[in-house]
Image (spheres, rainbow, N blue to C red):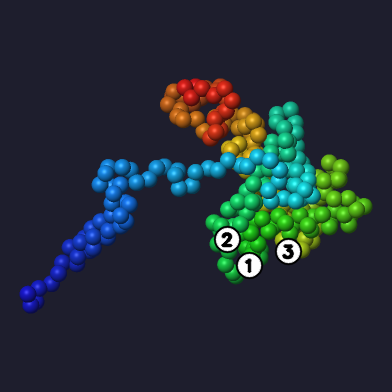
Amino acid sequence: MAGHKTDPMISRRALLASTAAAALVGSTQAKARFLSGEVPWAPGAATPPEPALPGGWIYFTPDEARAVEAIVERLIPADELSPSGKDAGCAVFIDRQLAGPYGGAERLYMKPPFVAGTAPEFGPQSPLSPAQQYRVALKSLDAYCRSNFGGKGFAELAPEERDKVLAAMEKGEPKFDGFGSRPFFNLVLQNTMEGFFADPIYGGNRDMVGWKLIGFPGARYDYRDFIDHVTEPYTLPPVSLQGRAGWNPGR
């Protein structure tokens, strides 16, 4: 009709309704599942946790693996409370992560420009993926140690010598080619902590030693019996995503 104006609110509502309907039944498979009453998805089905593969090193070379084990052993040394980072499987955790999506930077924005020296909130500023960062930095670390410690690689150094090198890396003193010593120190420290406290399904936190250290209960089904007792010690042993030996789901 001439002079008739369409209500913009009605138009927007109609558009939103039609868009939502199209999204809901956008595929034949989705239609079939919707009409049959079947839920078209399951929680966690898209990205379920993948257990770390057993066996030898996947990403690291033998020399790189020895260096990383020596690093994590000094970052988390053994004491009366827990085993070392090496014995807890932190190097295995890092190896498996570098061999997977994390190592390939699949979920990181990797387009230039890369600005060195920016604030931490700007995130990683390197054209190298985490796997490449380890490879480049470990090569520089080996060259630095052999040049300053009589031809010895990092893993061959005495504990106090390793600590000296790591302290220098934390300050950014050794000049590494391709990836700085300080960024590498921060990276391997972060990954070591992750390996010490992550679920054992990923290769680290062997025997749940990290969780036992801090009293974390792990991936138990629910905590309804303990909600009203938050001030009391939690005495049940931790449970991994894969369970644990002798685990009773009712406990």
Q: Toward the viewer: 7 or 147? A: 147
The residue located at (90%, 53%) in the rendering is 151
Check the image and report above or below for 124 versus 202: below
The residue located at (73%, 39%) in the rendering is 86
Sort mark 1 into few (<14), some (14-19) or many (20+) by Cα contacts within 10 Å. Answer: few
Q: Amino acid at mark 3?
A: Gly
Q: Which mark is residue 115?
A: 1
Tell me the CA gap for discs 2 and 1: 9 Å
Q: Mark 2 or mark 1: which comes first in sequence?
A: 1
Whether label 2 touches label 1, CB < 8 Å: yes
Whether label 3 touches label 1, CB < 8 Å: no
Q: Which mark is residue 178?
A: 3
The residue located at (63%, 48%) in the rendering is 97
Sort mark 2 into few (<14), some (14-19) or many (20+) by Cα contacts within 10 Å. Answer: few
Query: Residue 144 vs residue 20: left or right?
Result: right
Q: Toward the viewer: 219 or 234? A: 219
Tell me the CA gap for discs 3 and 1: 14 Å
Query: Residue 207 vs residue 21: left or right?
Result: right
Element under label 3? Answer: loop
